[in-house]
Image (spheres, helix red, strand yellow):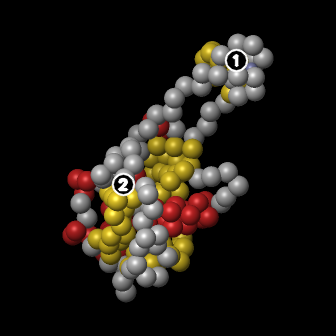
């Protein structure tokens, strides 16, 4: 999802326009036409989990999205990190909000830059403590899938699909690693 351009100054509310700042900066920035405040925009962090169930983590929890974008598609529990929280806290919060799942957080599993939309996505492995889910309003349904059951053509985001591919490949190998790559 692309972010909308900044149209108004966050300091004084007057119109802002995109141009090169005078200080030698090489990228156009939203600059206030009145107070000249330069508004820098930086990537947002998306944090989530791969909640697994079973002796060998053979099932993974997916959520059917009830909100745009990609309403009606399946995703891992994830969302935008909030201010004043850590990546682990954010991933845990999103898992509770979207799936109502009880989990024990595991290690960081994937870290992906998505420069096209100005985002960084990270997923932690997690162990489900029960199979009782209580999805929030952002989720139509939360349920477990084995690798064979995953609806690969109905996955909401490339970062989720790639994270799931790595998860099941690592599981097959019997050893989970850490995967850092870019989606361009
Ligand atoms: Zn201003």
In the shown orientation, is residue 155 left or right of residue 86? Answer: left
Q: Secondary structure at mark 2?
A: strand
The residue pinned by badge 2 equals 65
In the shown orientation, is residue 86 left or right of residue 2? Answer: right
Report if residue 102 is visible in the image: yes
Q: Relative to residue 133, is residue 123 depicted above or below? A: above
Residue 171's quadrant in the figure?
Answer: bottom left
Report if residue 157 is visible in the image: no
The label shown at residue 14 is 1
The percent coordinates of residue 87 (x first, y second) are: 61, 59
Q: Residue at x 56, y 64 (%)?
A: 93
In the depicted view, which residue is nearer to us: 140 or 8?
140
Q: Secondary structure at mark 1?
A: loop
The residue furthest right is 35
The residue furthest bottom is 55
Name the N-terminal-most of marks 2 and 1: 1
The percent coordinates of residue 133 (x first, y second) are: 41, 73
Q: Relative to residue 114, is residue 142 depicted above or below? A: below
Q: CA distance from mark 2 to mark 1?
A: 37 Å
Q: Residue at x 54, y 50 (%)?
A: 80
Q: Relative to residue 128, is residue 110 depicted above or below? A: above
Mark 1 CB within 8 Å of ligand 1: yes
């Amino acid at each position: 999802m692309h972010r909308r351009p900044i149209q108004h100054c966050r300091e004084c509310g007057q119109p802002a326009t995109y141009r090169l700042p005078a200080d030698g900066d090489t990228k156009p920035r939203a600059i206030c036409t009145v107070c000249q405040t330069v508004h820098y925009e930086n990537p947002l962090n998306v944090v989530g989990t791969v909640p697994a169930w079973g002796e060998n983590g053979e099932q993974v929890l997916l959520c059917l999205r009830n909100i745009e974008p990609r309403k009606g598609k399946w995703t891992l529990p994830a969302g935008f990190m909030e201010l004043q929280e850590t990546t682990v806290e954010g991933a845990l919060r999103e898992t509770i909000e979207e799936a109502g799942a009880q989990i024990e957080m595991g290690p960081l599993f994937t870290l992906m830059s998505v420069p096209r939309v100005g985002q960084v996505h990270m997923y932690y492995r997690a162990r489900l403590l029960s199979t009782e889910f209580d999805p929030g309003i952002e989720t139509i349904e939360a349920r477990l899938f084995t690798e064979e059951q995953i609806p690969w053509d109905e996955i909401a985001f490339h970062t989720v699909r790639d994270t799931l591919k790595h998860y099941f490949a690592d599981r097959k190998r019997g050893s989970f690693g850490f995967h850092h790559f870019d989606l361009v």
